[in-house]
Amino acid sequence: MNRNLILGGLLTAVFVIAALMSFVWTPHSYTGLDIPARLLPPGGAHPLGTDHFGRDILSLIMVGARTSLAVAVVAVGIGMLLGVPLGLWAAARRGSLVDEIIMRGNDLVFAFPSLVIAILITAVFGAGAINAIIAIGIFNIPVFARITRGAALSLWEREFILAARVAGKSSLRISFEHILPNVTNLLIVQGTIQFSLGILAEAGLSYVGLGAQPPTPSWGRMLADAQTMVSIAPHIALMPGFAIILAVLGLNLMGDGLRDYLDPRLRVARV
């Protein structure tokens, strides 16, 4: 029994279910203001309390989960969609000019953190969730390209790849028919890790005002709005903070569990 995988899967499932449920139901309206009920502590009709506008924090966290998960999923999807083919291409042309250009391009993107890329993008196009997705997605491309290239290089000298080359298969066909299936497990694990980092990045961008814009709730902006009232009502900062921690913890545990489950060497070691 893989406890990390089970616990991580349960934590992740809670946030996914909360995000999906927020499309049809939340305990209270996340846009409705109730000034007389502002800064209520957790309990009663508001299990997690209310913020400085009287909005229900549980409802805000549920809709914020929708925002964070959507940004992370699309951003990781962009990274995989572009990074994996680049990594396969670089591995197939190892030592060539193509390989050198791809890897030096990766180094160039790594030189600029996602926050800096977001600032550059928002300076031109303005702040918003779409631009946050683009910034995080761009940063994910070299991550998947490097992971894919590193794993593929170790496979190109294997006997079954040499047999495929002798059979007359092209490098492109070998990359997608033989290399890609053998690195998929690694990409799944890395995708889970990047998913958690995407949630953190989205929260950070929203915290500085570059992510989802009002009235769309975001965990990062909830923290930013709460920072001046921590001494008065600490729960309005603690609740979205705990949501971020638990979501990232769940995904990291699930990624660690998936690595153990999908790696045959680790399965043999456990037996």
Image: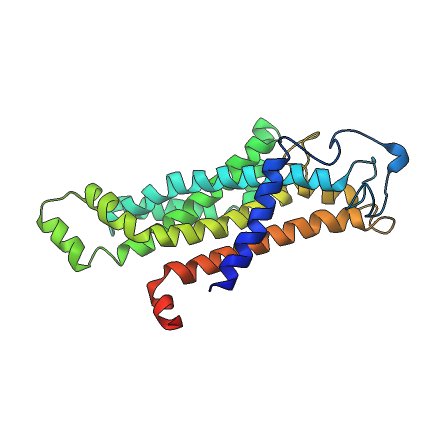
Please provide percent x and percent y for residue 125. 57, 27
Asked if residue 57 lies left or right of residue 127, the reply is: right
Image: 20 above or below 11: above
Asked if residue 171 lies left or right of residue 44, the reply is: left
User: Hey, which quadrant is residue 23 in on the image?
Assistant: top right
Q: Residue furthest right?
A: 36
Please provide percent x and percent y for residue 65. 62, 41
Asked if residue 156 lies left or right of residue 166, the reply is: right
Q: Which residue is drawn at 44% across and 39% down?
A: 77
Q: Residue at x 52, y 53 (%)?
A: 9
Task: Say if residue 268 shows up in the picture.
Answer: yes
Please provide percent x and percent y for residue 222. 72, 41
Q: Of 208 and 192, which appears nearest the observer?
A: 192
Task: Say if residue 211 shows up in the picture.
Answer: no
Q: Which residue is drawn at 48% across and 60% down?
A: 256
Q: Residue furthest left?
A: 167
Please provide percent x and percent y for residue 196. 54, 50
Which quarter of the figure is the C terminus placed in?
A: bottom left
User: Hey, which quadrant is residue 270 in on the image?
Assistant: bottom left
Q: Residue furthest top?
A: 125
Asked if residue 110 lies left or right of residue 10, the reply is: left
